[in-house]
């Protein structure tokens, strides 16, 4: 009888692709996949460790999985494997603390998941893990022919175009977990995208830690961020978008996780002239006040950000900009927060989210003086989101009566070109439409973030 493997995927879309790769390799190895954890001989929890709440969720999921296997006699000997960012970053500590875990898988071991599962099953139940996560920064990156078992609906897919990150943001530890930025080739991404479109995918969501840095790791070594934008170049995101747009079919190309330091006028004009590229840009800004940007080590200035937002909106008619900000970064004064709040109210971003600062062990910011009390961070978060809710409601109201093209996610729910799955609003359909197809609808009403059609 084939081994049954279940998987719980936590965290962001980048982690979801890692989960899909592990499932693809398990299936290629002849193992059965199950969505019922009680049926699994082996259960894998793919964890996130980006911020404290993510780590807490990951540990809770591991402990819950251990508790559940004790409640089901049929699988009292079920094996438990922890993978992902938390495993990569803390495996040496967790080996002693989470004795319930039978093995840990690092980010360079995604393609070794099947042999690791076999070794775990060959060991006596309760034996200490002897599989060690490699003690070096990850270098793995998928290719067009990497096996995947997609967890998204059939009509959209995440395409990981690069891995790792070269940015020095003081609040972030992703480079310490996922290593340096490393881009795939355009040919590799194009071949994967072509296959996905042939399978009926209507939306390709391009993801990496910094999508705008695609290809630049191969021709900007040692240059400053500003110099990288104007340097003579090799393959870049511009070339990738053109290559993907040449694929036959009716589909959207959506840009997620771009960085404000790497935008150029050429990239803006490229998006404007390629109809398959969604008029949507996800660009986390984190703050606008000059001192905060410097302390965050964001490699941008207030003037640069304000100018970039203007150039994006002028250069790409109908563009929706999604961004995120951090409230309560160490040392943030009331005046600095008010500068951020004013910027939110003035700029009127189409989509916006706010995080309260999370003090991440190992980051520069964690050691800074002036850590903000949790109560103050929550107040600032609420103020920022209240300002955005007002903006979102006004924007939604302005769309009533308009005809819009949507991608149908379910018979009663769809998304506009301005909405990415999971993070943005949706269009609530009052009459059912075919799932996975484009449709034209008339907006008849709205809620704060959602439209009714």
Image (tube, grey):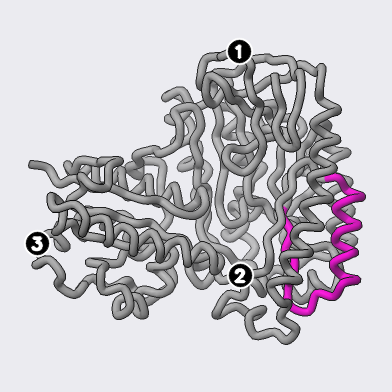
Residue bearing the label numbered 1 = 431
In the figure, 32 relative to 45: above or below?
above
Residue bearing the label numbered 3 = 122
Earlier in the chain: of badge 2 and badge 1, it is 2
Residue bearing the label numbered 2 = 172
Disc 1 versus disc 3: nearer the observer:
1
Q: Position of residue 40 (x, y in %)?
A: 21, 48
Q: Residues within 10 Å of mark 2 (few under 14, many from 20)?
A: many
The CA span between labels 1 and 3 is 54 Å
**Rendered image quadrant of residue 354:** bottom right
Earlier in the chain: of badge 3 and badge 2, it is 3
**Rendered image quadrant of residue 109:** bottom left
Q: Is residue 410 left or right of residue 70?
A: right
Q: Is residue 444 magenta?
A: no
Q: Is residue 305 left or right of residue 174?
A: right
Q: Nearer the viewer, residue 197 or 202?
A: 202
Q: Is residue 102 left or right of residue 238?
A: left
């Amino acid at each position: 009888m084939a081994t049954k493997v279940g998987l719980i995927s936590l965290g962001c879309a980048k982690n979801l692709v890692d989960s899909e790769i592990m499932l693809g390799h398990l299936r290629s190895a002849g193992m059965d996949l199950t969505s019922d954890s009680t049926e699994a001989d082996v259960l894998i929890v793919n964890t996130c460790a980006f911020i404290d709440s993510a780590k807490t969720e990951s540990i809770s999921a591991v402990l819950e999985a251990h508790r559940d296997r004790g409640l089901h006699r049929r699988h009292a000997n079920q094996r438990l494997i922890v993978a992902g960012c938390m495993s990569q970053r803390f495996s040496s500590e967790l080996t002693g603390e989470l004795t319930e875990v039978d093995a840990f898988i690092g980010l360079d071991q995604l393609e070794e998941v099947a042999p690791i599962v076999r070794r775990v099953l060959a060991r006596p139940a309760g034996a200490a893990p002897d599989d060690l996560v490699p003690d070096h920064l990850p270098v793995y990156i998928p290719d067009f022919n990497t096996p995947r078992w997609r967890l998204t609906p059939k009509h959209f897919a995440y395409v990981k175009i690069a891995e790792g990150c070269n940015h020095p943001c003081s609040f972030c530890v992703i480079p310490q977990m996922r290593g340096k930025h490393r881009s795939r080739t355009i040919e590799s991404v194009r071949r994967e995208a072509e296959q996905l479109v042939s399978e009926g995918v209507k939306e390709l969501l391009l993801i990496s830690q910094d999508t705008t840095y695609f290809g630049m790791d191969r021709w900007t070594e040692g240059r400053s961020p500003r110099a990288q934008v104007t340097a003579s170049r090799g393959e870049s995101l511009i070339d990738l978008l053109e290559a993907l747009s040449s694929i036959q079919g009716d589909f959207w190309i959506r840009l997620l996780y771009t960085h404000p330091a790497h935008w150029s006028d050429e990239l803006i004009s490229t998006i404007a002239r390629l109809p398959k590229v969604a008029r949507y840009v996800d660009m986390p800004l984190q703050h606008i006040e000059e001192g905060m940007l410097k302390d965050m080590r964001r490699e941008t200035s207030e003037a640069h950000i304000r100018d970039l937002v203007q150039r994006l909106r002028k250069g790409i008619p109908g563009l929706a900009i999604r961004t995120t900000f951090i409230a309560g970064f160490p040392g943030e004064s009331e005046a600095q927060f008010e500068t951020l709040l004013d910027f939110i109210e003035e700029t009127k971003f189409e989509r916006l989210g706010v995080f309260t600062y999370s003090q991440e062990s190992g980051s520069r910011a964690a050691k800074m003086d002036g850590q903000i009390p949790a109560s103050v961070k929550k107040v600032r978060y609420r103020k920022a989101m209240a300002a955005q809710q007002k903006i979102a409601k006004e924007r939604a109201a302005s769309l009533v009566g308009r005809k819009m093209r949507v991608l149908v996610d379910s018979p009663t729910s769809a998304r506009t070109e301005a909405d990415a799955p999971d993070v943005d609003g949706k269009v609530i359909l009052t009459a059912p439409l075919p799932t996975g197809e484009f449709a034209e609808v008339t907006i008849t009403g709205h809620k704060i973030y959602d439209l009714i059609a």
